[in-house]
Each structure stands twice: as structure tokens, then as C-alpha cells.
């Protein structure tokens, strides 16, 4: 997975095993002159084997989001999204986003996109209207209050989702528009 904003690029490496098999990592590169130089390697503060941190990455300005769709902290493979901010010298983990209705194998963080103060996160394992793995997209918005944080604003799921549609397999956000793909719609 890759993302770029201005002179900064982030690349996911979900197979990295620094904190255990498939714990994952993400690499941040900055363009300096005509060369891209590795600036930092990102890992989750609570990295664990099998989390697959780096499955999807997104960057907008001084915010990087890295997903770990098999994170088990709330429920087995419920998933999570880690938010990093540039503090002027390095990228610092600021928040971990989880679904308020997290459940086993929902896989929040299969995809992620961010545009300024809005982020869309795909969760392909969500069940809608009794249909397993129909999927969903969570919308988070930056709340600059004290302390600033990302807050879930909405959960998107079209009314005609079916069995194994995997809505949220891919997502993109730009301004006030969110587009989401469903991998298996017949």
C-alpha cells in the first residue's frame, strides 16, 4: 500500500515481522532535492504478531493513517487504524481508531483514505441485514477540540448489500465525496 502528499510518501509493509510474524510496519520517505530519503519506520505502539499493520496507508498533510486489519485488542481480527502526526522532527503515534461496534473478524482497516479532516475506513467483514461479510465504511472526522482527536461521524452501508459483497474493499475520500468499492457484488 502507498500514499503520497506533497514531498512525503508512506509505504505499508504488512508482512514485516519486527514485533512477530506479520506484525507489520510502514515506511515514510521524504523527497530531498531529487532523491527520496527514508525518514522513519512506523510501527504500532502495541504491535503484535499477525496484526498486519500496513495493510493500507493514507497521508494528508501532516497526518498519516496506517491500518492493522487483524488487530485483536477489542475482538479477534476486529481491526484498527493508527494515526500519526508530524511534530516537526518525527512522526508520532497520536491515536488508535476502532469501531464502536467492533466484532470478531470485522477487519476494520482493510482500506483507508484521508483528505484533510475526513477519513474513510473500509471494514469488509461487517455483517449488514444478516448478510455475512457484506462490509461497511466508517467515516471519521478530525475534532480540533482539546485534546484534538478523530471521532467517528458515520457508518456507511448501502441498503442493498448482499452476502460477501465486501463493501469497503477500497475507499477514497475527496472533499465531501466518499467512493467505496465492493469487491463481490453480483
Image (cartoon, rainbow, N blue to C red):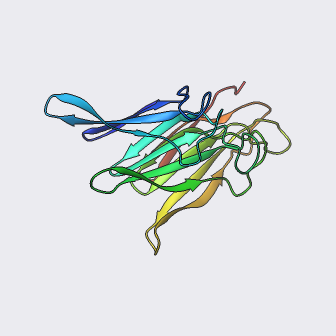
Q: Quadrant of residue 71?
A: top right
Image quarter hosting the C terminus: top right
**Outermost bottom residue:** 146
Residue 97 screen position, x and y as percent: 58, 54
Residue 71 makes an appearance in the image: yes
Instruction: Identify the residue at image location x=73%, y=37%.
Output: 125
Residues 12 and 49: in front is: 49
Provide residue 171's location: percent of width, then percent of height: 53, 38
Q: Residue at x 41, y 53 (%)?
A: 92
Q: Among all residues in the image, which is located at the extreme left?
A: 33
- Name the residue at 69% across, 33% down: 166
Q: How many marks overall?
A: 0
Residue 58 lies in what quarter of the image? top left
Among all residues in the image, which is located at the extreme right? 130
Given residues 55 and 151, the one toward you in this image is 55
Point 56% across, 47% down: residue? 81
Q: Is residue 174 visible?
A: no
Examine the rendered structure and indicate whether residue 108 appears above or below residue 141. above
Judge from the rendering whether residue 185 lies leftward or rightward of residue 162; answer left or right.
Answer: left
Image quadrant assignment for residue 140? bottom right
Which of 152 and 64 lies nearest the eye of the viewer?
A: 64
Counting from the top left corner in percent of width and height, residue 80 is at 62, 46
Decide if residue 140 is on the left or right side of residue 88. Answer: right
Q: Is residue 74 left or right of residue 41?
A: right
Q: Position of residue 76 (x, y in %)?
A: 76, 42
**Where 186 sits versus 93, above or below?**
above
Amino acid at each position: 500500500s502507498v500514499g503520497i502528499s506533497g514531498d512525503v510518501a508512506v509505504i505499508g509493509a504488512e508482512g514485516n515481522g519486527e514485533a512477530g510474524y506479520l506484525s507489520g510496519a510502514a515506511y515514510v520517505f521524504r523527497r530531498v532535492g531529487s532523491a527520496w530519503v527514508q525518514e522513519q519506520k512506523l510501527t504500532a505502539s502495541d504491535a503484535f504478531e499477525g496484526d498486519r499493520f500496513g495493510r493500507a496507508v493514507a497521508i494528508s498533510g501532516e497526518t498519516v493513517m496506517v491500518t492493522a486489519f487483524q488487530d485483536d485488542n477489542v475482538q479477534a481480527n476486529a481491526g484498527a487504524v493508527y494515526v500519526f502526526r508530524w511534530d516537526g522532527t518525527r512522526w508520532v503515534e497520536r491515536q488508535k481508531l476502532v469501531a464502536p461496534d467492533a466484532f470478531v473478524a470485522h477487519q476494520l482497516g482493510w482500506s483507508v483514505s484521508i483528505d484533510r479532516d475526513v477519513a474513510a475506513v473500509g471494514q469488509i467483514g461487517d455483517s449488514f441485514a444478516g448478510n455475512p461479510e457484506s462490509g461497511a465504511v466508517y467515516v471519521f472526522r478530525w475534532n480540533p477540540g482539546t485534546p484534538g482527536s478523530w471521532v467517528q461521524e458515520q457508518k456507511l452501508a448501502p441498503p442493498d448489500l448482499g452476502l460477501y459483497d465486501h463493501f469497503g474493499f477500497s475507499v477514497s475520500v475527496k472533499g465531501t465525496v466518499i467512493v467505496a468499492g465492493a469487491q463481490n457484488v453480483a
